[in-house]
Amino acid sequence: MNTGKPESHHVSVRTECILVVDDDVGITEVVHWILQQKGYECIIANTGAAGLAELNLHDFDLVITDLKLPDMSGLDVIRSIKELELKMPIILMTSFSSVENAIEALRLGAIDYLIKPFHNEGFVFVVERAMNERRIQRENVVLKRSLRKVFSKNAIIGESDGIKKMLAMIQRIAATDANVLIQGESGTGKELVAQALHYGGSRADRPFVPVNCGAIPSELLESELFGHTKGAFTGAVAANAGLIREASGGTLFLDEISEMPLNIQVKLLRVIQERQVRPLGSNNSYVTDTRFVAASNRNLKVETEKGTFRADLFYRLNVITIQVPPLRERAEDIENLAQHFLKYHSRKQGNRILGMRQDFLDFINQYDWPGNVRELENLIERVVILAESDILTCEDLTDMLSVSSSEMPFSAKEERPLSIDEYIKKFILQHQDSHTEIELSSMLGIGRKALWERRRCWGIHKVKEGDENVSPEPLDRDFR
């Protein structure tokens, strides 16, 4: 194996790297020289097996392989590259101007082919055309991820002290490669934090790969993470590189990692320690440059003491911990979040909702939000869909919030959150001495008949002097 690196007097733009697989020394020396003169890094492999081994060690931009190799066909090399789900273009070289071989190479995924012997100019033309396609491919990936990065930067909304401290920590550690553990209740936005860590650092133009460890059956999670060879198990009809290798160069986000079975935790620990991954059914290990960001709504320290989570994996992941505050501890952010979700879902649903009336804002500011930001967004989405006017009122919230949620304990408060009717009852008792029935019904966003029916049901008869003390006809609706 020979390597050559062109001299560069510029500060480091990544040198594009080309793998050449051929056992003809005369050809490889010429090809190596041409590519070096054009500014490429060139790595030579003299057999198909050696070439495939190099794919484990380097991130190649182009593969050029001869058809006839000592140990296998160049077509076999192309098949292996495609089975590994590698995306770089491939050029086939052959001394035999067989139409069948050329067609088969193109069918398997080669981008072009060269007939030997070739002129230097023709060789350079074919290589440059392939490399231009590779550059466009990379630029498209970068563009898509840049757009996601812009979204991610704007997605964490808040001016509370807890959010400001969290954003400052994200900014400090995003540029590092340190593994991070994100802790927080369900619905607090842990994946947004992981995205901010990824897109705020040097890995922003590489993959961000999320996986929910609790959403994938344990018997499938292992092959999803580590990959598998064709035929490794029943149903493995094609090779799968696995999510860890898919995230190489970028970030793998392991959500709800506390749900990961212990046997898979052992394998993950080995990958983090050795920076190599071995697919199921394979004897080969593949180098991976993956940053691991994990998240859990459980206290992993407690889980290690209970024996449900490995302590050694916990310490590998817990290089830095970010605690995401629950929504009830950042009450000053609720209105801004609601406005953000209102604009988003109004555009998405095509409903022209202009805003929220004060009674609506009063309720969402007093509610405890056991489901956190996710519950707030879900509520805003529902009221936007079902709202009958362009201003949201408390009446739009009826029957939309449960008295409590099984998602999360209310550790920050002794009382559970108020239901809609509890809120209305409390509001009436607090304000009935200073407001008329008309004013109360207007402030609550409900009709006078609905207000009277609730009073009758709850036995609240006191009415401010000057109001008409005449009971409206009962409604035929059921106000629960």
Image (spheres, helix red, strand yellow):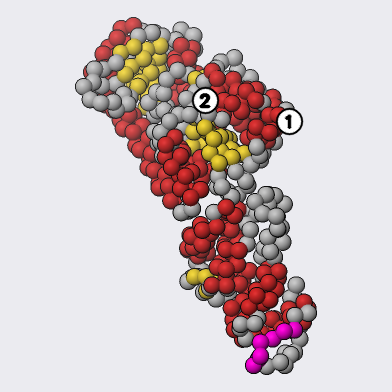
Find the distance from the CA under tag 1 to the CA under tag 2.
39 Å
Q: Residue at (62%, 62%) from the top-left corner?
A: 367
- Secondary structure character of the magenta stretch overall: loop
Q: Amino acid at mark 2?
A: Leu
Residue 251: percent from the left, percent from the top?
Answer: 49, 33
Which tag, 1 or 2, sits closer to the chain's start? 2
Classify 10 Å Cα crowding around label 2: few (below 14), some (14-19), many (20 and above): some
* Viewer-nearest residue: 65 or 201: 201
Residue 230: percent from the left, percent from the top?
Answer: 61, 24
Is residue 213 found inside the magenta-colored segment of the image?
Answer: no
Q: Is residue 294 visible?
A: yes
Region rendered in magenta: 461-467
* Viewer-nearest residue: 111 or 317: 317
Q: Is residue 40 above or below residue 28?
A: below
- Seen as rendered, the residue at the extreme left is 9
- The residue to which callout 2 is attached is 84
Horizontal side, residue 449 vs residue 279: left or right: right
Q: Is residue 57 above or below residue 291?
A: above
